Amino acid sequence: MDQEFEKITRKIRKQAWELNNNFKLIDADDLVMVCLSGGKDSYTMLDVLLNMQKAIPFRLIAVNLDQKQPDFPEHILPEYLSSNNIPFKIYEKDTYSVVIEKTPAGKTMCSMCSRLRRGNLYSIAEELGATKIALGHHKDDVLETFFLNLFFSGKLEAMPAKFLTDDKKHIVIRPLANTREKEIMKYASYREFPIIPCNLCGSQPNLQRNIVKKMISQWEEQYPDRVEIMFNAISNVSPSHLFDPTLFDFASLQSSSMEKLKDINTVKL
């Protein structure tokens, strides 16, 4: 078990460092707000960032947004963070009641819950003076979002490892964007994190994300390494072979024969 734990630890850390090298997720003197939900992904992300602190002189603070979901065990995160000497803050915001009240019967809660949580986290980051906001999305989340946008929103968009918010105020990073969920599950199991389950949206049947997750899982079973190939595809984009004229100047395209014709006409004149 020790060897397996060391192996998965090295792999996850290496993947995070590769992302950092490619996207420069973290700079020296950053204050990184680590969004900690109490799930396996955010715990793993926190561990990865704590390890990166050994090489990059940045500060971090773990932040949990207590959304007042019923039976939320409020003591778990403060006890875990205090026992590990990790700076943290807990913010209470009853978004749960808003989501329950505003979501029509039979509709999923994810969109509104996510929007309210994101807005509050951005406000907290501004209050703290954080230069980066770290989210725990992994490679499977990235691909699922890509297919959700493709199939249900009609756009090519995923979750980037680093992006600037629309208001230009915040930089959001995803240190686990190159890591598979199954690897995080192994790591979290070895580390025995005190996991806090989400009982709000995860319990809803027929979520579009669950449908896409099942689809990708079936592809992976039938065609091994399919996830890695698909992820490589969104990392290897050719704008000239798509249909977005804002990304590539199709209107100005001219063949070499047209250029020659222009030269001939110029000479004749």
Image: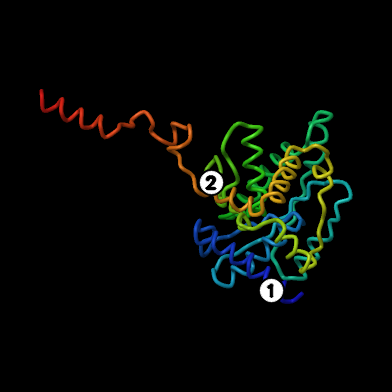
Q: Dividing the picture into quarters, in which one does residue 93 lie?
A: top right
In the drawing, what numbered circle is on residue 164? 2
- Which quadrant of the rendered structure holds the C terminus? top left
Is residue 192 positioned above or below 67 on the image? below
Q: Which is more toward the observer, 173 or 209?
A: 209
Residue at 60 percent across and 49 percent down: it is 126
Q: Is residue 3 left or right of residue 237?
A: right
Tell me how many marks there are: 2
Residue 168 image offset from top left, x and y in percent? 52, 43
Identify the residue at the far front of this view. Answer: 222
Look at the numbered disc 1 and give the secondary structure of its residue. helix
Which amino acid, mark 2? Leu
Q: Dividing the picture into quarters, in which one does residue 56 lie?
A: bottom right
Residue 98 image offset from top left, x and y in percent? 79, 36
Q: Is residue 242 left or right of residue 117?
A: left
Residue at 60 percent across and 31 percent down: it is 154
Q: Dividing the picture into quarters, in which one does residue 247 lie?
A: top left
Identify the residue at the far bottom of this view. Answer: 2
Colour scheme used in the picture? rainbow
Q: In this view, does 106 lie to the left or right of 29?
A: right
> Which residue is disc 1 drawn over?
6
Q: Do the residues labelled 1 and 2 touch (CB within 8 Å)?
A: no
Residue at 54 percent across and 40 percent down: it is 167
In the drawing, what numbered circle is on residue 210? none
Look at the numbered disc 2 and give the secondary structure of its residue. strand
